[in-house]
Amino acid sequence: MENLNIKVENVEPEMYGKTTRIYKYEIDGFTRLGKEIRISPKANITINKPGYTTEFYVETVNVVIGIGKDHTADLIMSKDAWEALNAGEPVNIITTEDFKKKYIYKK
């Protein structure tokens, strides 16, 4: 992966409607994800209020996923996590029911 140092700048043309997120990062290079990740429809999600923020203090890997013609999602992980994925480490995804059993339901 060659070092490109590309700064990402948000562009907000009016034709796209309201802003849903702001990006602030620099791209060092491009490469392939390398391994398939399957996310079960039973995977637990959280629905966050506006203003949700995540800030990484290590190198990251980002995959932009197109959804329909008007939507995108971001899969973001540390570069170390991506390297573990490509080294064959197992991928585990918690279901909503397992999440509730572990964190919500009273014992």
Image (cartoon, helix red, strand yellow):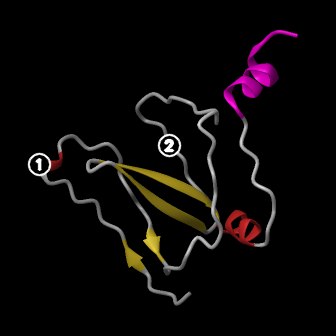
* Residue, disc 2: 53
Residue located 64% across and 36% down the image:
43
10 Å crowding of disc 1: few (<14), some (14-19), many (20+): few
Callout 1: SS: helix
Q: Earlier in the sequence, mark 1 or mark 2?
A: 1
User: Which stretch appears magenta?
Assistant: 95-107
Direction from residue 32 to residue 86 in the image, left or right: right
Residue 30 in the image: above or below residue 99: below
Tell me which residue sits at (49%, 30%) in the image: 48
| 60 on left or right of 25 | right
At 55% from the left and 52% from the top, the residue drawn is: 55
State whether the magenta stretch is mostly helix, strand or loop: helix
Q: CA distance from mark 1 to mark 2?
A: 24 Å
The C terminus lies in which quarter of the figure?
top right
| Residue 102 is one of the magenta-drawn residues | yes
Quadrant location of the N terminus? bottom right
Residue 31 on image: x %, y %: 53, 79
21 on left or right of 63: left
Residue 85 position (above or below residue 42): below
